[in-house]
Amino acid sequence: MTKKEKTDKKGFFSHWIIRNLMAAAIIAVVLLVGAIVFLNIATKHNDELTVPDLRGMTAAQAQLAAESAGMRVEIIDSVYSQRNRGKVRSHSPQPGDKVKEGRRILLTVNAVNAKKVTMPNLVGYSSRQAAAELSTRGLVLGRLIYKEDIATNNVLSQLYKGHPVAPGRQLEAESVIDIVVGLNDDDCETRIPNVIGKTAQDAARVLHDYYLNVKGVNYDKSVKTYEDSLAAVVYRQNPPASELSVVLGTDVSIYLKVDENTEE
């Protein structure tokens, strides 16, 4: 083989290798682009849906709303509340979240059937002990009704819907229990604390700790759902906080809103 033939043969193989490498590279790029396009189509990349607010709906209503939005629902838990029985309490992902089409929305609903709890015997307890016992049993302390007695804040009787309620009676969870407590003229004063920024539940607990009553819980227009009512905080109270003495059992009204920018 001549030198020229050897050079031509070497050049042929060099060009053949380069051409094949280039072809392989082009094929790889085409496959990669095809894979990306396929995945984008399969996963609907950049095609996100907004989770609707299903709170306050029945399970059936939530299912229809979710299907209309391109999603599906599944009930994973239930809680009990006297309000909004059988309605969606919360869900995950939350309202406004971005998800893919067909995403499963997990619902927590309020149970339809009432949960029953046992009424304790509060007579002889202090009002604070009574409040703690009621909370432990799943009941709610209502009004402190003061009656002249030798021992201030000693529980004299317990009432449900204005009538005496015996220990051991089965009541719905979250039932409100009023207690009649003693009031000694030598120990009958307290002051009004500041409950601004607290939820309704926390504000009521603080006021009861100061032996005061919640006269009214008033929500402004920012509170639209049950969840809003749980998250709302006090922005005004009447009477306002003061170091001046007031009689035990004084009524305090509280006003709540969800966000601080809401107009009164």
Image (cartoon, rainbow, N blue to C red):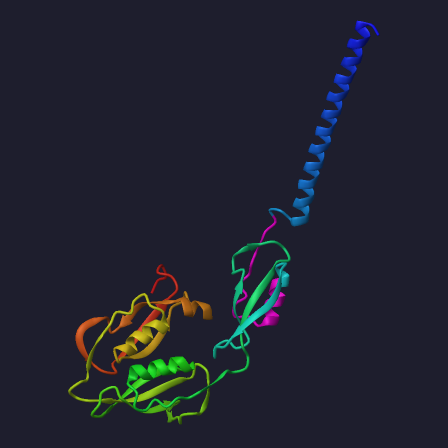
Pick out the residue farthest to the front.
Answer: 1
Q: Where is residue 122 in the image (x, y as percent from the top left)?
A: 34, 89
The residue lying furthest to the right in this view is: 1
User: Does 133 appear above or below 219?
Assistant: below
Find residue 29 and report its horizontal and vertical position in percent.
69, 33
Examine the structure image and report whether residue 259 is included in the region drawn in magenta.
no
Q: In the figure, 229 relative to 153: above or below?
A: above
* Position of 53 relative to 121 (above/below): above
Image quadrant for the C terminus? bottom left
- Residue at the spot 17% in from the left edge and 77% down from the top edge: 245
Vertical placement of 119 versus 54: above or below?
A: below
Whether residue 75 sits left or right of residue 225 in the image: it is right
The residue at the point 70 percent across, 33 percent down is: 28
Q: Depth check: 177 or 154 in front?
A: 154
Q: Residue 23 at x, y = what percent?
A: 74, 27
Residue 195 figure quarter: bottom left
- Judge from the rendering whether residue 193 lies leftward or rightward of residue 87; answer left or right: left
Nearest to the observer: residue 164 or residue 47? 164
Query: Residue at the spot x=42%, y=69% of the render?
Result: 230
The number of numbered discs placed on residues in the rendered structure image is 0
Q: Is residue 190 left or right of residue 97?
A: left
Which residue: 31% across, 79% down?
Answer: 215
Span colored in magenta = 47-66
Which quadrant of the rendered structure holds the N terminus? top right
* Left or right: residue 94 compared with residue 138: right
- Please state the horizontal and vertical placement of residue 24, each as a whole percent of the image: 73, 29
Residue sitting nearer the eye, 21 or 257: 21
